[in-house]
Amino acid sequence: MLQYHTAGESHGKALLALVDGFPGGVEINTQAIDAELRRRQGGYGRGGRQQIETDRVEILSGTRQGKTLGSPIALLVVNKDYKLEKLEDIQRPRPGHGDLSGSIKYLGSIRAILERASARETAARVAAGALAKELLTPLGITALGYVVELGSIRIDPKPGTLQQQRESRDASEVYSLDPDKDDEVKALIDSCGERGDTLGGAIEVRVEGVPFGLGTHAQWDRKLDGRIAQAVMAVQAIKGVEIGLGFESARRRGSEVHDPIRYDPQQTSTRSLGFTRPTNNAGGLEAGMTNGQPIVVRAAMKPISTLARPLESINLATKQPDEAAYERSDVCAVSAASVIVENVVAFEIARAVVDKFGGDSLAEIQARLKLFHEMAGKR
């Protein structure tokens, strides 16, 4: 099974991701991983921490001469802002954060909780997801994440090819598919920051080139939509996840929700095997399995919990009313979250590919994928 674990604290020496079950023979481009780490640090509305860090990955194990060995891969991202041993504890828990719940759960300090609960940990998850993309790319599978809503502003994606949309996203300071909306969004972020407040938003990730049959209906914990939802929901500040039409499907009748099935003999050589849909309300997943259509995932991110104009709280030492503590933070991190969600989704797709097609090497997976398409096309 392809899986990963992370370690490290926000102001500790480094962040680590240990990836196990990764196939051998995959050529790794560390510059591509570094590019994803840089994107995670960007986006309009980020705070001062991003001026300190210059995230880069160092691969400590599992590769030789630029290719994976099939053994565990250790990824290291160094923290320049290392000062964990010098930081004092805080006594005023921040509403919306894990400060109060965690300090009570572990019978310890708030500092012990916030250092690991911090979204700084997601640098390791982005590194793991970007590594997974190195497996997906030679299989013709791509993931694209972008912002579709920020605060009260909806940002509808402009149509275009995958390459055009990627270029549009990269040209936007808020990582949307409509850079023309940037000025309006930036003005909202600035206004919010001036009031000492924070902003949330919504993210969409689309995965294309996905073959039929990833995931399974057979067990609840192996359904791919469930695995994706869990991975996305586990990202800091994410409070809702949708696949395809999502919650809107509850407001419509079945005839307006389910995607009709058609067949086009001219498309039998594609990943859809000739089966086409005029809509993709299912978001590429039915009964926990991919159906040959693009996977579409949306996530709702709440505003950052740390406010420059603190909310009401208490002092844990005195139990008296007080303002919540302030730790250096962002006004808006929705753009960064779009990078994180894109990469955690990519990892789940890679995990499902390894589950379905097995193989200890990329060459074996490619051969099995080809054989599966040939067999499926003859049934």
Image: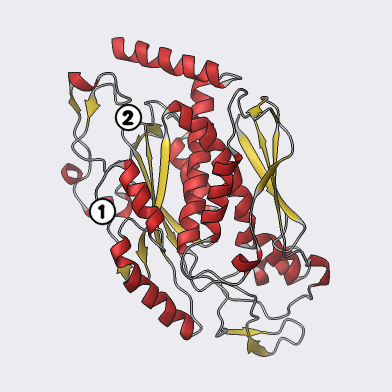
**Quarter of the image with the C terminus in it:** top left
User: Residue 335 versus residue 234: which sits nearer the camera?
Assistant: 335
State if disc 1 and disc 2 touch (CB < 8 Å).
no
Residue 199: where, in percent of width, then height?
45, 72
Label 1 sits on a secondary structure element that is loop
Specify the amino acid type for callout 2: Gly
Compared to residue 378, the image places residue 51 above or below, namely below
Is residue 230 at all visible to an observer of this figure? no
Residue at the disc numbered 2: 292
User: Residue 79 versus residue 241: which sits nearer the camera?
Assistant: 79
Residue placed at 52% from the left, 62% from the top?
Answer: 237
Label 1 Cα crowd, 10 Å radius (few <14 / some 14-19 / many 20+): some
Q: How is the image coloured?
A: secondary structure
Residue at the disc numbered 1: 158
Q: Is residue 76 left or right of residue 35?
A: right
Residue 34: where, in percent of width, then height?
58, 48
